[in-house]
Image (spheres, coloured by chain):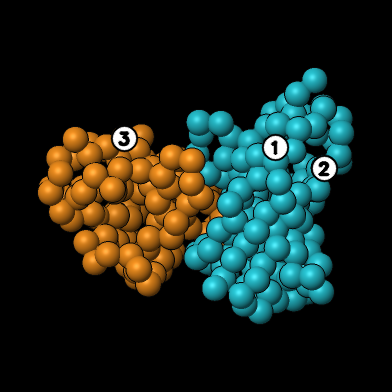
Amino acid sequence: SYELTQPPSVSVSPGQTASITCSGDKLGDKYVCWYQQKTGQSPVLVIYEDDKRPSGIPERISGSNSGSTATLTISGTQTIDEADYYCQAWDSSAGVFGGGTKLTVL
Amino acid sequence: EVQLVQSGAEVKKPGESLRISCKGSGYRFTTYWISWVRQMPGKGLEWMGRIDPSDSETNYSPSFQGHVTISADKSISTAYLQWSSLKASDTAMYYCGRGDYSFDSWGQGTLVTVSS
């Protein structure tokens, strides 16, 4: 079955840029979306179709996807960005999530 | 406002059956697929399967095929996730999400606890 691989954790200082990767076989041929999940809350869509932001998501959150790696980038990281982030794609008609990355802002 | 409202927390014994629900409002329910996602305690998100409420077509993850059943009643804008025989390992938070390719709206989650 198809797998998406994310680093378990990423740390960043406030104001710096955080990059979270998501790897999968020929992932660049698929659309990738990203979700943010804060402790005790439901996930929130932050990027869809590789690089599109839903209404209400700040411009400092961006996405890209090429080759076998998709990347979520958060510029000017703030403490409110501290959360778990999950990438997601589709393999035929089955959804697949990455294992998740815990973003720590310190 | 688009909303998905899930049924409340459940505590069940192993071997019991269960059906949890996800009611959509604020949009035409038959327009978007509804997916179910499991999150075991302290773990990540797992896609379980989805349903097209317009015709009840379903897709399942190989990991969950045969273990759960997804259904919908479009007349009351509600999707369901059900088990015929729960196991302790089914203890988790279950979310429903709206969307054909990405999930732009999520339910608040239903906590299912299975314990003898």
> Could you say which quadrant of the image residue A45 lies in?
bottom left
Q: Amino acid at mark 3?
A: Ser
Q: Which chain is orange?
A: A
Label 3: element kind = strand
Q: Are marks 2 and 1 on the same chain?
A: yes
Q: Residue at x 81, y 67 (%)?
A: B73
Q: Is residue B20 above or below residue B79?
A: above
**Labels 2 and 1 touching (C-beta < 8 A):** yes
Q: Nearer the viewer, mark 1 or mark 3?
A: 1
Residue B98 percent coordinates (x, y): 59, 65
Q: Residue at x 68, y 74 (%)?
A: B29
Residue B14 percent coordinates (x, y): 82, 27
Which quarter shows the C terminus of chain B?
top right
First-in-chain label (2 vs 1): 2
Distance from the alpha carbon under mark 2 to that under mark 3: 35 Å
Q: Is residue A16 above or below residue B2?
A: above
- Residue identifier under label 1: B112
- Residue identifier under label 2: B18
**Labels 2 and 3 touching (C-beta < 8 A):** no
The colour applied to the residues of chain B in this rendering is cyan
Judge by depth and name the residue closer to the eye, B11 or A89: B11
Residue A60 visible in the shown view: yes
Q: Amino acid at mark 2?
A: Leu
Outermost residue, top direction?
Answer: B116
Q: Which mark is residue A9?
A: 3
